[in-house]
Amino acid sequence: MTNRIDGPLKVTGRAQYGLDHNFPGMLYGYVVTSTIANGEIVAMDVTAAKSAPGVVAVYSPFDPLTLRRPNSPMLGETWVPLQDRDVAYYGQPVGFVVAQTYEQARDAAMLVEVSYAERPARTSLVDNLDLAEDGPPAMDGTPPTHAVLAPGVESIEDALAASPVVVEGTYSTATQNHAAMEPHSAVAVWDDDANDNDANDNDANDNDANDNDANDDDDTNNGLTIYSGNQGASFQQEDMAAALEVEPSSVHTINPFVGGAFGGKGSTSVPAFLAAAAARALGRPVKAALSREQVFTATANRAETLQKVALGADRDGTLIAVRHDSWCSAALDRSFVEQTSHTTSGEWYATRNLATTQKVVPLTIPRTTFMRAPGEAPGSFALESAMDELAVALDMDPIELRMRNSSTGPVGSDLQWSSKYLDDCYRIGAERFGWSQRSATGREDGDWLVGMGMASAFFPALRFPATTEITLRADDTAVVSVGGADPGTGLLTVMSLIGAESLDIAVERITPRLGRSAYPPGGLSGGSTATASVGSAIMVAASAVIDDLQALASAPGGPFEGQDVTYADGRVLAGGRSMTFGELLTALGRESVSATGSSAPGEELTKHSFSSFGAQFCEVRVHRWTREARVSRMLGVFDAGRIINEKAARSQLMGGMIWGVSAALHEGLEIEGNGRLANADLAGYLLPVNADIPEVDVHFVQHPDTLHNPVGARGVGEIGTVGMAAAVANAIHNATGIRVRHLPITIEDLLDDEVS
Amino acid sequence: MRPFELTAPATVEDALAEPGTFLAGGTTLVDLMKLNVLTPQHVLDINALPLRGIDTSDGLRLGALERMGDIARHPGVYPAVSRALLQSASQQLRNMASIGGNLLQRTRCTYFRDVAMPCNRRDPGSGCPARSGANRMHAVLGTSDSCVATHASDVAVALIALDARVTLAGAGGTRTVELADFYRLPGDTPQVENDLRPGELITEVVVPRLDWAANSTYVKVRDRQSYEFALCSAAVALDVRDARIVDARVAVGGVATVPWRLRPVEAALRGAPVSQEAFESAAAVATEGAAPLSGNGFKLPLLRRTIVRALRELTEGSRA
């Protein structure tokens, strides 16, 4: 149990997020967005806006800031605004007003008049299935149409037809927005106007107690310095460099604190591109932020999905056939495909026959992107609802059904799971939750109908290449650095813990630093990978720096010259003598010794499959008369390898589980026929409030997975949300007998005939 | 938001002497100014006016500037009023919003709040996208071809059920209006929402004494447990003696263009036994004449069920 080391800064308001930075002469930009979903901008009248008080510049496709589209191997192409007159969705950035104050920029933005040649919008997924295209291959290379059939079986339909028990259902999930507390935003400063940065940026340095950058090198370098929340400094650095056609080395990104990302800040945002380009054009620092309403359209959302699942089983519950066909919405640029079928049905349960498809339907809607458990979150709603339906059809306990079909690896793969304790999760969960008290038809408590539901959770265990630097200092402290981001996940604290363990010193003596492109690349906050990736690299760097230290100690002129030096407990030892590394460095007249270490996935990928696992439980109460569904308690039991910081991991999983409740009962962007979002603010787009989340219990089944990485930790960032929406829907079915196959589930879905 | 002039009169007389838009808690006005829905040139901050006081000695008298949160917590306030307030907005908003301002809050219709869209209420004659658009939250009672927006207040529903009156001060003097007569159905003029004359100010809200309203409640049905507007709500007061209903007050919210008193339901309850059957048959009257839209037909059964639930909660223990 370790408190977040950045916690005090955050709860006292001293943590400076990107937008909190201010510079002399700074200007403010406000984005103008489209009010059609499909068409071309014919004209923009900016006369009134340009003459409004305080306005410095108005940019538009007719008077653009030049930006190129970055393309990254991991995140794909990133859209940049104002480069042409096409409008592909309602709320698309089409203009940028820069003024002396934020209010002036906002007021002037309201005066921009845009004329369009409008084309019909196409916004409904279900009404446009005829436009479906094959999706790209899944991350593991699985093609969009995929089947594994038992010998002698001709087709999945034959396998289903031969199954004694079959359930089939069509499931759908809503478009969601990440709704991070920090809106997408940036402050951009170019070198000429940055000369006095450091003098005026003093509070940035003051409050970065964890960021200890007094002697950092990047604030006054030539080029662009950008303060903007992101999921990995090097990604933003590369995006900005490509967009602005400058060398990556002349872009310095700074984001020690990020107010939530969840996949929505992987690609660089519109305000960052526009602020940087305008700051260059105007020769002054520029700050820009999206309004809350704009965040819903001018960033990117989770896709809407439609999924058809058929499960065929023997009467004892053994799966014979699994068919999972998926469609997802996408913007016209098809920039992202939500992979819901193969990522779930392709891996979760043993089956002799499997068929999955993945289609994408391009629409005139805001772009889609990664959102916490992309694929697995909506995919698990379909599969785990269908499993519950199968359990009902078989009159079998839902947990027993899942245990009967436990997978030893992905369907059709020779690579077995490296370490899997999912059955323990089910058993422990059932015990802790009181599952044995569940009846097949729920129970009543006064005018409330009470039900219990459960679901499985899987999320692939991944890691990415990462490099870290460790500096041992003469004051017996150590600095551990990586360019990655900590958008509330707890990576900064994890770096301290793994750094302390690897260097065999107290955690208080570690200063972790992240969130700057000046630090070594790695530690992307995405794919639940940061702990495994950065932790492994820290272990390598620690080993390297200890080697260097020992070499210094035994080198000619060193205090242990010629001796065989060992290292333990922060000390070098030889011949019955020992010194702390700080004493050694002092004796050598050195301030510090540094080493970098890198780690990346490798040979293990040819030997095993890797995943985290979990069992989700929840209890839901539905009012007999007015039919509100309220979650009254929930539990998640997870097998995620070794847990580095149980307190932060628990918070991560709680957040994920709450997100699952939110998807189940609250969240859904409503896209109108003309492309307008009907509920694009936090009053209309519902997220659960405290009163909706009474009790959350998280339990870990801890088995370090050192086949996956040296740290033994698998990810916990995303698995918490997987399965939870299905667990809620399954509990509602248990309480009411009503099966709802779409999300979110609202009151009208649960009206019965009791009062007509 | 557009630049505006702000003054802060110290007396009611001063406030009435200046033309402008009154600012109390600001929870509606500032919100809508930020969205450019309201663009007043002159704003009068009336928070210094002496329109305070919560008096429960004979019914309920509320100074118009009393905050929602203070009224909700005050002992002796009828339960329906207190519960309606406590289920409104969030604690932070209740700490700011005044009771007078609450009664004048504008609709939450998504099209009213978006200046890029037509709206007959905001821009008369421009049209009503809600009739064919996103109308799940909209009204089924009191609607017209020109407007189907719901009135968003919770406490106004409870106040209407309890025959509340508002005192209005204007340049021409002071007058009292029944709250039930204060609100205007949209008809062809949805931009006219109430009986306020230009420059008039609500100074006081008065609920006449009704001792049996100690047995009253407010049931609010919504998509999340707190901080959300009603899909449907019911304020009910019941006078129950010997397992029979002697008298009843029923008003509903979330379903109508104005806070909606249901006198036909009250009549059906009067003299009825305390029984599920009687509740259901009285509630069945509630939706007579209702006009559902494409996305809110569920509000008809939900309205009946909400009334039944409120009646059940008020008769817990005395039901047959």
Image (tube, coloured by chain):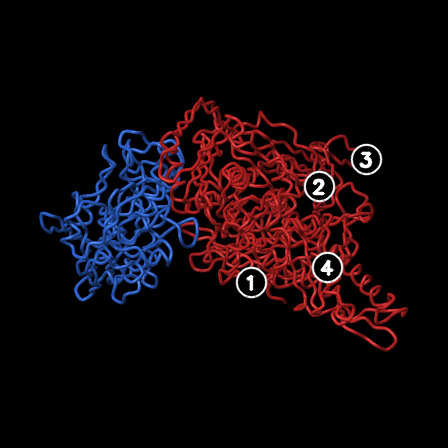
Chain colours: A red, B blue
Chain designation of label 4? A
Q: Mark 4 or mark 3, which is nearer the start of the sequence?
A: 3
Q: Mark 3 or mark 2, which is nearer the start of the sequence?
A: 3
Report the amino acid beneath label 1: Gly
Q: Mark 4 or mark 2, which is nearer the start of the sequence?
A: 2
Report the amino acid beneath label 4: Ile
Q: Which mark is residue A151?
A: 3
Q: Which mark is residue A470?
A: 4
Calculate the distance from the C-alpha at mark 2 to the C-alpha at mark 4: 41 Å
Total marks shown come to 4
Residue with the mark numbered 2: A346
Calculate the distance from the C-alpha at mark 3 to the C-alpha at mark 4: 55 Å
Calculate the distance from the C-alpha at mark 2 to the C-alpha at mark 3: 18 Å
Q: Indicate the position of residue A8 as horizontal and vertical percent values.
A: 54, 64
Query: Cβ–Cβ below 8 Å for labels 2 and 3?
Result: no
Calculate the distance from the C-alpha at mark 1 to the C-alpha at mark 4: 23 Å
Report the amino acid beneath label 2: Gly
Q: Tell me the residue at 39%/39% (across/down).
A: B136
Calculate the distance from the C-alpha at mark 2 to the C-alpha at mark 1: 40 Å
